[in-house]
Amino acid sequence: MKYISTRGSAPALGFEEVTLAGLGSDGGLYLPEAWPSFTRDQIAALAGLSYVETAVRVMAPFVAGSLSEEELRDLCTQAYGRFSVDAVTPLVQLDHQHWLLELFHGPTLAFKDVALQLLGLLFEKFLSRRDDHLTIVGATSGDTGSAAIDAVAGREKIDIFMLHPDGRVSDVQRRQMTTVRAPNVHNIAIDGSFDDAQALVKQMFNDPGFSSRFRLSAVNSINWARLMAQVVYYFYAAVRLGAPEREIAFSVPTGNFGDVFAGYVASRMGLPVRQLIVATNVNDILHRALSDGDYSQGKVVATATPSMDIQVSSNFERLLFDAGGRDGAALAEQMRGFEATKAMRLTNAQREGAAGLFSSARVDADGMTLAMRWAYEGGGQVIDPHTAVGLCAAKGADIDPAIPIVTLATAHPAKFRDAVERATGTRPALPARIGSLFDREEAYTKLPATFEAITGFVAEHATARG
Ligand SMILES: *Cc1c(COP(=O)(O)O)cnc(C)c1O
């Protein structure tokens, strides 16, 4: 499988190179040259398979040429063996139409583990083949950071620098990052928002003077391997609910557009997806883009769903590229315009390409609270605020009652205990696998949100290119 960049001028690369690189050298994002496609029979044959076997079938075409099926199975067995339930991503029924897909049974309690546990192993495998060293720089609104750090802590060939917005992640999220004491883990709290952190990371990649000194890589969802791993649970859930005979809709609490893009990929591969509901909080750039074609950056408002407090969604570029006819040169031009003015209009082709599959909803604090209460009082389920945003959008969607709607439950409620307690009066207990999170000592460095401060720190602590 070859991968091409959304901006048309980076070289086409194989899976191994794309995984290690993260971002394209032209500033674009990689995606497959052509989508693999599954027949109805191939989808039907997934019924009853374990999560790991499903993962091997779904991901095999994407890693072809870089990993054998045996190697892929081995990595999946290791990665998903760290989840606390056999099903890895179990479905829970709420009522006749609504389901939750619980994606938070990994080591750090959010769906990011599904992809990052695998990505950590892929990095290790590919680095040992080439005897190379990797410097990961990432920005996190909370969950990516903890999942990435868990996945790479203590690995010899990797240093990780994780930027989080100071004071804007939950105490559980922060402690899951800052209490991991491994020599290769560096936590940085920046004085700014998640978007500031993400912009700094992009700037590091795009600065040739800096990026040539290290082998930089990304663990944000700009890394294709992450999206690939997330495609699996769309198949796994849909098949359990009757696909390919029956269509399934998904509601996805969305920030950087990675998780819902994986649903789009599943649909391009042949999974009968009726609709993908993009649920945003009041930071609603994606809702405005999908409903009116207006992709213009607002000011980030802090909410009870910090992992969705985003005004620039990196992965949206992948949709604009694919749905808009795959014209890299035109998209590069459009994105340059966006970067200069912080606003752009979607083209008609992009809007029409998205319209058949996507709908969107903006959910405010009241909608979120009502959904949390409904799940608790009606279905006995304590859900986290992000999941509640998705569920509120699902309940408001206009979809045939015969079609199951699966809301992706993206975080364990204990990760956001204060917000859950405010809405439901119940304080979720931390699962035992989190251990003594509140007894362990924290370590992190506070830095101003400037390029000089961050690159100075990284240069001082990272292993330079050999
Ligand atoms: C990351 C995250 C999201 C947003 O996912 P994207 O792939 O960035 O759209 C939603 N909910 C939770 C709990 C998250 O950690």
Image (cartoon, rainbow, N blue to C red):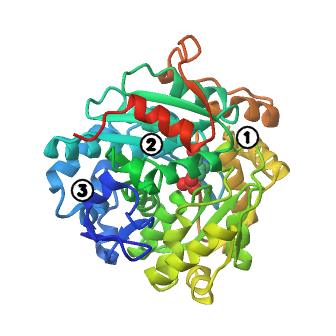
Judge from the rendering whether residue 314 lies leftward or rightward of residue 301; answer left or right: left
Q: Nearer the viewer, mark 3 or mark 2?
A: 2
| Mark 3, secondary structure of its residue | helix
Using the image, determine if residue 176 lies above or below residue 451: above
Q: Position of residue 293 (x, y in %)?
A: 70, 79
Q: Residue at x 69, y 39 (%)?
A: 380
Quarter of the image where one finds residue 155: top left
Query: For the residues marked 3 and 2, what is the alpha-carbon distance in whole angstroms?
Result: 19 Å
Ligand 1 contact, mark 2 (Cβ < 8 Å): no
Report the amino acid beneath label 3. Glu
Q: Nearer the viewer, mark 2 or mark 1?
A: 2
Q: How would you rate the neighbour count of disc 2 (Cα within 10 Å): few for under 14, some for 14-19, many for 20 or more?
A: many
Quarter of the image where one finds residue 43: bottom left
Quarter of the image with the N terminus is: bottom left
Judge from the rendering whether residue 63 lies leftward or rightward of residue 327; answer left or right: left
Quarter of the image with the C terminus is: top left
Q: How many marks?
A: 3
Q: Nearer the viewer, mark 3 or mark 1?
A: 3
Q: Nearer the viewer, residue 341 or 286?
A: 341
Mark before the other along the chain sequence, 3 or 2: 3
Disc number for residue 336:
none
Q: Nearer the viewer, residue 272 or 219?
A: 219
Q: Nearer the viewer, residue 51 or 268?
A: 268
Report the amino acid beneath label 2. Val
Q: Which residue is mark 3?
A: 16
Quarter of the image where one finds residue 291: bottom right
| Mark 1, secondary structure of its residue | helix
Disc number for residue 137:
2
